[in-house]
Amino acid sequence: MASTPFTSKRAKAYADISDDKWNNWRWQLSNRINTVEEFERVLPLTDSERRALSAANLFRVDITPYFISLINPDDPDDPVRKQVVPTDSELVPFTAMMEDSLAEDRHSPVPGLVHRYPDRVLMLVTTQCASYCRYCTRSRIVGDPSATFSRAEFEMQIEYLKHTPQVRDVLLSGGDPLVLAPKILEEILSRLREIPHIEIVRIGSRVPVFLPMRITTELTDMLQKYHPLWMNIHVNHPNEISAELAEACDRLTRAGIPLGNQAVLLAGVNDNVHIQRELVHKLVRIRVRPYYLYQCDLVEGAGHFRTPVAKGIEIMEGLRGHTSGYAVHQYIIDAPGGGGKIPVSPNYLLSMSDHKVVLRNYEGYVTTYEEPTDYLPSRSAQFRGVKRPEPGQSGVFGLLEGEQMFIKPETFDEVHERSGIQHRLKDPKKWVPLGIGSGESPKNDPEEQT
Ligand SMILES: *Cc1c(COP(=O)(O)O)cnc(C)c1O
């Protein structure tokens, strides 16, 4: 690879470590920092950090020597430091805080397999990571070796997938799949590849960021046997983009793995449009496509990292149009209670009439788009063979497709009965919409006239 414009750093405490050791991922893992004494040798702790490190029930702390070296030891507000060094703010509860804010465990047909969306699943393959993010959305299980998934649970996950043909995309996460023993990771990949309806496998990993030396050619040679394989990494601040990360990403992309980035919007770390622009620009330079920017979840320990949603909208306003489309991620709120990912964005559609829309661009230029008045949509009948069923999850799109006419809260019908009796005016047939869902077809249905 051409010499990279990015730099390498090594904290003073590691000056005497040989390059062989430093570049060995096993050495990095076994020399992770987690006690006050170990921290003090590398960076002086603040009182708040020291208090947090001696608190009972603290979410697991571990930082690789490589990653801690990216921190400026003289800056208590360093954006890398805030992500991995605990402070006593994480012990403070807040309104709406939850242990499992995304209700993942409720959506798990089998332990460790989250089936939230119609055609894809999240498969948690370990609870261990190379280092631990203080705002972890899965801190309820992550970091705890006793919470990890058993062989029997893995077999149940595979069994569920074999019998669930609508799943075409499996997302491996955890914990971090790339800290698994290479043999175990390979077994998971090859077992998934044996299932014919699984089209793509993705890995969500922060190993390239915490432990870039783990991305060896041996690993990428193994991974590329299981294509199509995609990967999302997790970088939040431009300071995390080092020469080592650039090299790790180069190996992964050369192995044919498209890379995306999932960042989390974090107060005091990256809640600023100028930092976000620098982040996405550095990402595309190392051939990583910004994918999602997440609003911070309502998870225990993360209260002090949260920003108003308006901050995210403001950041998106400062990206779209101002820079390459490739560098613009989508801002997402992962809905509390298990509603799934919801994209939020500034509004660009100002108004519309029967054949005209009024739009504004990123500069505030207001324009109209004249729509056709003679448009005939292609008849859906010709696409019937390629429709994928989404039992019970077709949602608002299902309304457009005519599968049903309304979506109503669970208690809607009861409430509107007003506890009245069944009487001559209440014929249930009155509310069956003609031509929608299981209702009868109206005589002029164009699909029936072919
Ligand atoms: C994020 C997530 C996915 C993947 O979502 P995409 O929008 O397809 O990236 C799948 N399952 C669960 C439970 C998730 O949280």
Image: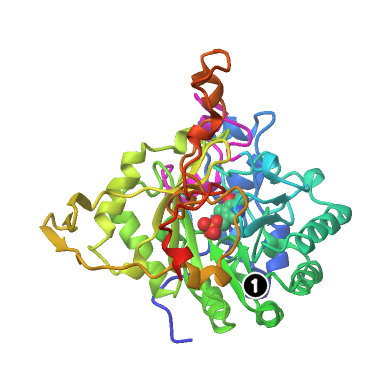
Circle 1 sits in a helix, a strand or a loop, which is it? loop
Q: Is residue 12 visible?
A: no
Depth order, front residue of 246/320: 320
Identify the colour scheme used.
rainbow
Which residue is at a point 82% across and 44% down the rendered structure image?
A: 146
Q: Picture coordinates of residue 296 (x, y %)?
A: 47, 42
98 shown above or below 203: above
279 shown above or below 344: below
Which residue is at a point 57% across and 35% down the rendered structure image?
A: 337
Which residue is at a point 52% across and 19% down the rendered structure image?
A: 424
* Residues drawn in magenta: 74-102
Which quadrant of the structure image shows residue 420?
Answer: top right
Amino acid type, callout 1: Glu
Instruction: Check if residue 81 falls in the magenta segment.
Output: yes
User: Which residue is the site of mark 1?
Assistant: 199
Q: Picture coordinates of residue 376 (x, y %)?
A: 31, 68
412 left or right of 198? Answer: left
432 shown above or below 368: above
